[in-house]
Image: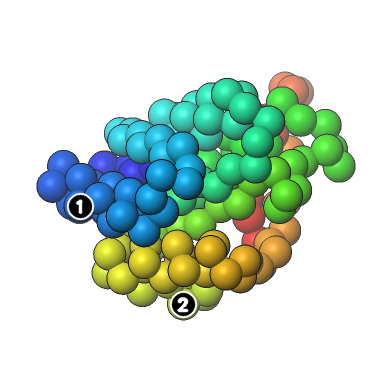
Amino acid sequence: MVNRSSATGCSDATIDHLRVILEEALGDDINLQTEIVDDHAQARQQARSFLAMSDAPATIITGGGGGTLRAVIEGICEGRQQGDLPGGDRIRVAALRMGSGNIVAKQFGVPLDPERALIGIVANLKEGRTAPCCVMRCEVGKKDSPPEVRYAVAM
């Protein structure tokens, strides 16, 4: 999933090139779905819809900044009870640094170049190299209104 409005934006040519890299690297072994979104609300909805399509283990590779990554995490977590979030056997998330900032991806050493980053992510997934992260559930709001639930990933 690529948020084309992240940072200075992503061209359709860049997105198509990344899709070709994935298709070549993964072959016919998987069902590849590519989504282009224009904002965080769409990223959240696409992540939720993606997981609802099947109970099979899945990976979401997101291209954008920290806000796009947060939106994907929220889409994965929304509607679930505390302590009932999907584990690594159900969903894995990787991030390309295609926004104005993505501290999580940066701390994991993801290169700025999306092509190099994607090749590295695919290699790590094929080798089973993943790193667990924590998902925080935060309730925010004013005293006299119901809280709004937000999720964030932390290392």
Is any part of residue 66 visible from this angle? no
Q: Is 70 located above or below residue 43 in the figure? A: below
Position of the N terminus by quadrant: top left
Which residue extends farthest right?
83
Left/right placement of residue 88 relative to residue 38 reads right
Residue at mark 1:
17
Circle 1 packing at 10 Å, graded few (<14), some (14-19), many (20+), is some
Q: Which amino acid does label 1 sit on?
A: His
* Residue 149: numbered disc: none
Cα gap from disc 2 to disc 1, whole angstroms: 22 Å
Residue at the (52%, 69%) spot, across then down: 124
Left/right placement of residue 28 relative to residue 8 reads right
Which sits earlier in the primary sequence, circle 2 or circle 1?
A: 1
Q: Where is residue 136 in the image (x, y as percent from the top left)?
A: 72, 51
Is any part of residue 74 visible from this angle? yes
Q: Which amino acid does label 2 sit on?
A: Gly
Q: Position of residue 94 (x, y in %)?
A: 50, 57
Left/right placement of residue 83 relative to residue 132 reads right
Residue at the (40%, 35%) spot, across then down: 33
Q: Which residue is at the front of the view, 154 or 120? A: 120
Position of the C terminus by quadrant: bottom right
Q: Quadrant of residue 5?
A: top left
Q: Is mark 2 on a helix, strand or loop?
A: loop
* Residue 109: numbered disc: 2
Circle 2 packing at 10 Å, graded few (<14), some (14-19), many (20+), is few
Q: Is 58 located above or below residue 18 in the figure? A: above
Residue at the (71%, 52%) spot, across then down: 88
Q: Position of residue 106 (x, y in %)?
A: 45, 72
Q: What element carries label 1?
A: helix
Indicate which label's residue lies in the foreground, 2 or 1.
1
Q: Is 69 located above or below residue 145 in the figure? A: below
